[in-house]
Image (cartoon, rainbow, N blue to C red):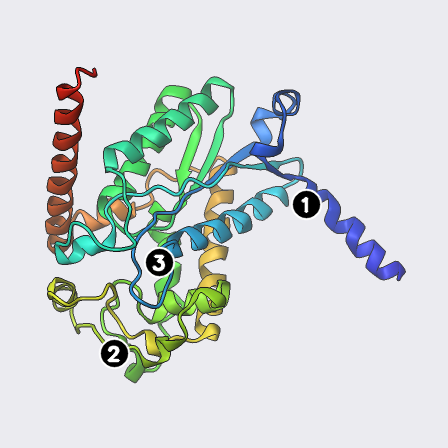
Amino acid sequence: MHAVLLLLLIALPTAAQVLQLQDLNTRQILELDRNKTAIVIPGGILEEHGPYLPAFTDGYLSQRMAADVASAIAARPGWKALVFPQIPLGAEPYNHLGAKVSFPGSYPIRSSTLRAVFMDIAGELGEQGFRWIIVVHIHGAGLHNRALDQASDYFHDVYSGRMAHLWGMVPVIGAWGKAMESLPDAVKKEDGVSLHGGMDETSLMLYLRPELVAADYKRAPVQTGATLDASMQVAREAGWNGYVGSPRLATRELGERIWKALSASAAAYANKVLDGEDTTSIKRYGDLLGGVPAYVKVDEGARESEAAVARKQSEWLKSKGIN
């Protein structure tokens, strides 16, 4: 009994340092030490993940990672993590891999809108004196990641604070791939260049939210390629149902392995930022994708789609005399 009580008392100080912004009143917010309070903003695009995974897969991953990162921040002596309400908005869903503008389950916003949302929020936090913002927004598209990087740069340049888009750091996202390096060759070959909703993402959801994975994933047909171009061609086929890879190979154990590596890397780089380390030289994922011709083509298609949406909205507004 005494041992259990002692463990609870030890855990309480750390738990108390993770605060939910929506629960605080004005007085409580004003009392926060701006130098030792990190705002953690979880994102999450609503994006199709095929017939076996929920549309908010990236959101659930972001939600859990934000919680893990917040706990790591709270473990720093004297620090508090202030968790912002989750923002379920993202740009350039993966159906653009196959040049499919609209797809059931995908509800994106334009990348310029995403950038504006995060710039607006960062600006409000900056005006109130906050200096540290950690964005946790798991999604692999180029336009999406560059928009968040640009919002982060804005906060640094205008408010002299640090805003870090963790998923945009290559070493953070790279932990995912490293956790899969030891898989048997036969498994790697079957999963191929698994771009979306394949073995890895299905494994992660089996670990984090198994109740949301459709039971028939174990009978999922293999749809993949041995190269990036071949896998993208799969997504261009008329009957493509939203994933590239082999979901049937997924296991909870693999999901746990990937998650622990990914979470540890995210926490480590969040701490590097809060320690004041210069992370500007870290390769950005959005820039990395911008150097791959196949992804450049996908981005071009996404930009055209976003421009068409902007024109449609602008024309309607103009027709109604709305500025």
SS category of the residue bearing label 3: helix
Residue type of the residue flagged with mark 3: Gly
Quadrant into which the N terminus falls: bottom right
Labels 3 and 2: the sequence-earlier one:
3
Q: Where 130 sits versus 260, above or below?
A: above
| 31, 240: nearer the viewer | 240
Residue receiving disc 2: 221
Indicate left or right for 238 with 210 as reference.
Answer: left
Q: Return the x and y of residue 230 as percentages of the image width and height.
A: 12, 69
First reached walking from the N terminus: tag 2 or tag 1: 1
Q: Are marks 2 and 1 in contact (CB under 8 Å)?
A: no
Quadrant, the C terminus: top left
* Pair 3/1: label in front: 1
The residue wearing badge 3 is 174
Q: Nearer the viewer, mark 3 or mark 2?
A: 2
- Number of marks: 3
Q: Position of residue 321 (x, y in %)?
A: 17, 15
Neighbor class of circle 3 (other Cα within 10 Å; few <14, some 14-19, many 20+) is some
User: Which of the pair 303/253 is nearer the observer?
Assistant: 303
Q: Secondary structure at mark 1?
A: helix
Which residue corresponds to mark 1? 15
Label 2 sits on what residue type? Pro
